[in-house]
Image: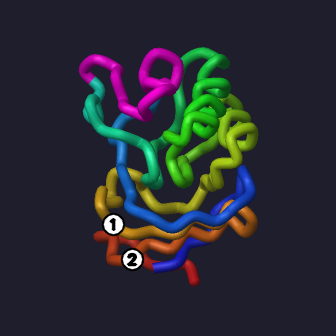
Amino acid sequence: MIFRGRGIAKGVAFGELLVSPEPISFLSGVNPETGEIVEKGHPLEGQDLSGRVIAFDYGKGSTVGSYVLYALSKNGHAPLAIVNTEAEPIIAVGAIMGGIPMIDRTGVPITQMKSGTQVTVNGDTGEFTYEGSIPGVTSKE
């Protein structure tokens, strides 16, 4: 299935999707040295973002979260790409600084996506390719 959204940070990435049912705070919620989600009680606590495409509705927390995304990139533990329902400045700036492809506004409900699915994120064109079906959602090819 192919969807068109808005490109936020340039680049193209292909990989395994990790879906978060809740927003992510990169400041104190993600370990910049390991890529592990460390926020207590978060549904993805203990999961590693490194080398995966992360999908979540929007970010939360301090503007320092941008620098955590940048640090993840410099430490080799950044997500391959980011998909948001609606990008907000903290995550967008971090993705741009870290060279992490990012898109939003695909029209696909994040909670309908399945972790483990192979996806392609094209931050240059805003295109999102999902290797499978999403219940109740039709492709926007």
Q: Which residue is mark 1?
A: 117
Say whether residue 37 is magenta: yes
Q: Amino acid at mark 1?
A: Thr
Q: Residue at x 52, y 78 (%)?
A: 2
- Quick one: quadrant of the N terminus? bottom left
**Label 1: element kind:** loop
Residue at 70%, 47% (x, y): give it: 99
- The image quarter containing residue 68 is top right
Specify whether residue 36 is painted magenta.
Answer: yes
Q: Answer with mark 2 or mark 1, whichever residue precedes in sequence.
A: 1
Vertically, is 30 above or below 44?
above
63 relative to 72 in the view: left or right:
right
Q: Residues within 10 Å of mark 1 (few under 14, many from 20)?
A: some
Q: Amino acid at mark 2?
A: Glu
Q: Do callouts 2 and 1 mark residues in contact (Cβ within 8 Å)?
A: yes
Describe the element under mark 2 as helix, strand or loop: loop
Which region shows up in magenta? 25-41
User: Which residue is painted at 43% across and 78% down in the image?
Assistant: 138
Residue at horizontal 56 percent and vertical 34 percent from the top? 75
Per the image, the residue denoted by label 2 is 131
Where is residue 63 shown, x and y percent of the image? 66, 18
The x and y percentages for residue 37 are 36, 29
Instruction: Say which quarter of the image contains residue 94.
Output: top right
Q: Nearer the viewer, residue 3 or 93?
A: 93
Please state the horizontal and vertical placement of residue 8, each as a whole percent of the image. Answer: 72, 51
* Dominant secondary structure (helix, strand or loop) of the stretch shown in magenta: loop
Q: The C terminus appears in which quarter of the rendering?
A: bottom right
